[in-house]
Image (tube, rainbow, N blue to C red):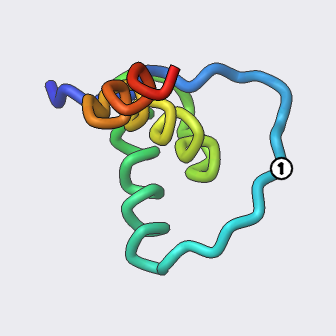
């Protein structure tokens, strides 16, 4: 079984986000959503809904950012 950094995506109220993604990144998001669906047993998630948890995970695990944030507080 593949160990993904994201778990199941919470089904909450929709959030509108408008961004332009390079085509290769969009294809990666689609593929990630498909793998995530297989791993969690949930239906495939809209790839756009992956962006927020991915950014949250990135920020939460960025040690440099955490250190800079503590120093600025």
In the displayed structure image, the side of residue 52 where residue 28 appears, left or right: left
Left or right relative to 67: residue 10:
right
Q: Residue furthest left?
A: 1
Camera-side residue of 26 and 62:
62
The residue that appears at 17% across and 30% down in the rendered structure is: 2
Q: State the residue in front, 53 or 36.
A: 53
Q: Residue at x 38, y 48 (%)?
A: 32
How many neighbours does mark 1 have within 10 angstroms: few (below 14), some (14-19), or many (20 or more)?
Answer: few
Q: Residue furthest front?
A: 72
Where residue 16 sits: x, y (%)? Answer: 83, 50
Which x, y percent locates residue 63? 26, 29
Q: Nearer the viewer, residue 55 or 15?
A: 55
Report the number of discs. 1
Q: Position of residue 64 (x, y in %)?
A: 27, 36
Which quadrant of the figure has residue 17?
bottom right
Q: Residue at x 49, y 21 (%)?
A: 8
In front of the other: 17 or 49 = 17
Image quarter in which the N terminus is found: top left
Side of 26 relative to 36 (left or right): right
Residue that badge 1 annotates? 16
The answer to which image quadrant residue 49 occupies is: top right
| Image location of residue 69, percent across then percent down | 44, 27
Residue at the image point whose x is 45% and y is 56% from the top: 29
Q: Secondary structure at mark 1?
A: loop
Q: Is residue 54 shown above or below 6?
A: below
């Amino acid at each position: 079984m593949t160990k993904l950094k994201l778990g199941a995506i919470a089904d909450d109220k929709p959030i509108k986000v408008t961004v332009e993604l390079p085509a290769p990144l969009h294809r990666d998001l689609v593929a990630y959503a498909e793998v995530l669906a297989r791993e969690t047993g949930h239906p495939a998630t809209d790839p756009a809904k992956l962006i927020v948890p991915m950014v949250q995970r990135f920020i939460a695990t960025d040690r440099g950012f955490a250190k800079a944030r503590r120093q600025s507080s």
